[in-house]
Structures are given as structure tokens and as C-alpha cells.
Image (cartoon, grey):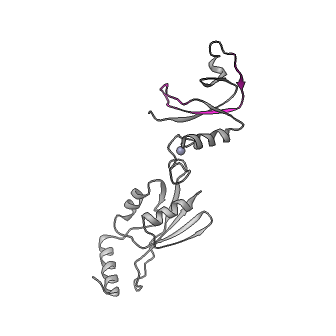
Amino acid sequence: MSFMVPEYENGPFYLTDDGAIPVDAGAPDDFDGETASGWFCRLSAPGYMDATDWNGPYSSEDEARQAIRDDFGACDKCGNDLLETADRCPTCEPFTVVVSDRDRDPDGDEAPAVTLIVEGEGAAEWATRVHQTLGGSSWEAAGDTFAYNMQDTYPGCFDAWQKEMPDAEWDFGQASEPSEEEHATEMARLAAIHGYV
Ligand SMILES: [Zn+2]
């Protein structure tokens, strides 16, 4: 199927056996049914004849938008599939993940950690996924904001995290990855402290 985007129309529709038809499109032949007013919605493929039937009437545009999400599992703005794990469009409703600079403690017995601040509606769902996928060591929540302590930093980890979690807007502005040399030194130091090589 071609890519479908949502369409909304507020106005009178003919209610026919083959679905609702906007009055602007003209009455079907031999039409003797009813008309209905309100918001209607459908998914259609721009440039093609492909479209779903019009659904409606709904009493507000918001309700029509909700119907696109509920009935088609599609984003009411862009038509993308909503994530199965959350009622969320990965394009229009991204999470923000702000990454802090590494907290280095040259004398400590733990690896330098960065903090990931996860913000956005439904951040809990995303934060749980971060926890499972990226393996943050500890996390705490304050409302819609989640803070992660991530000790597993290594050269190239920012790219790897982004690939693992592409439906987030990552902000690495405050952060830096360890260099190969720095990482090797740190690993060797920790191995010596913890007694393994
Ligand atoms: Zn969207």
C-alpha cells in the first residue's frame, strides 16, 4: 500500500451504503439517504486514488484525530505507524534525551558515568526501554522526567545509542565520549582495583 496520510473534513457528508461522501463531491446517483454534519477523517495516499472510507461524524477535530489513532494505529499528524509499545508517533512525538558530560572520578572504583535525562510525554515507557536496551545502571523518576546513570561509556557509544534508540532526539551537546586511549586506561585501572584483567 502506498504511504497514507490523514485527512480531515468538517462539513456535511452524504451517508451512503458505500461510506460517507463529502457533499462538495456531489451527490451520488439516485441518492435519497441522509446527510450528516461534523468532522470526518480518513487515510489517503497523496497522488493516488488509494484511500480508506471516511469515518465520522465526530463532534470535534480532536475526536476525529483520536479515531485515526485508535482505528488505524496511525499518527493523526503524519500517518506513520504508532509504536506498538506506546501510543506514540516516533516522528512527531520524539523523546528528548539529554546526555551530560562524564563524571570522572580518577580515584574512585567505578567507571566514569554519564547521566541521561529522558523527557517527554510517556517518558516512562521509553525509559524502561532504555533501561532494558542500553542497560543503564540506575534510574530515578520525577514526573515525566527520568534520570539514568550510564556507566558503560566507550568510544563510539553515542552512535550506538542513537542506532539503538532512533525514535529519540538525542542531545549530546554537553557530553563527550572517552577516547580509545582514555577508555583503555580507565578499564585497566578498574581491572586492577577489582582484581580482574
Ligand atoms: Zn507523526
Q: On the rendered structure, is 103 left or right of 54?
A: left
Which residue occupies the foreground of this view, 167 or 177?
167
Q: Indicate whether 99 appears above or below 111.
A: above
Which quadrant would the N terminus be assigned to in this image? top left
The image quarter in which residue 56 lies: top right
Q: Indicate whether 171 appears above or below 25.
A: below
Do we see residue 26 in this rendering?
yes
Residue 154 in percent (x, y) is at 35, 69
* Residue appearing at x 67%, y 41% in the figure: 63
Residue 17 in percent (x, y) is at 62, 23
Q: Main secondary structure of the magenta part?
A: loop
Do we see residue 174 in this rendering?
no
The question of residue 109 being in magenta is answered with no
Q: Residue pushed farthest left?
A: 197
Q: Which residues are magenta?
A: 32-52
Q: Indicate whether 18 appears above or below 58.
A: above
Q: On the rendered structure, is 13 left or right of 46?
A: right
The image quarter in which residue 189 lies: bottom left
Which quadrant would the C terminus be assigned to in this image? bottom left
Q: On the rendered structure, is 152 left or right of 10?
A: left
* Residue appearing at x 54%, y 31% in the figure: 52
Residue 33 in percent (x, y) is at 70, 19
Q: Indicate whether 176 appears above or below 112.
A: above
Q: Residue pushed farthest front?
A: 17
Total marks placed: 0
Q: Residue pushed farthest top?
A: 30
* Residue appearing at x 58%, y 58% in the figure: 122
Residue 99 in percent (x, y) is at 48, 65
Which residue occupies the foreground of this view, 122 or 30?
30
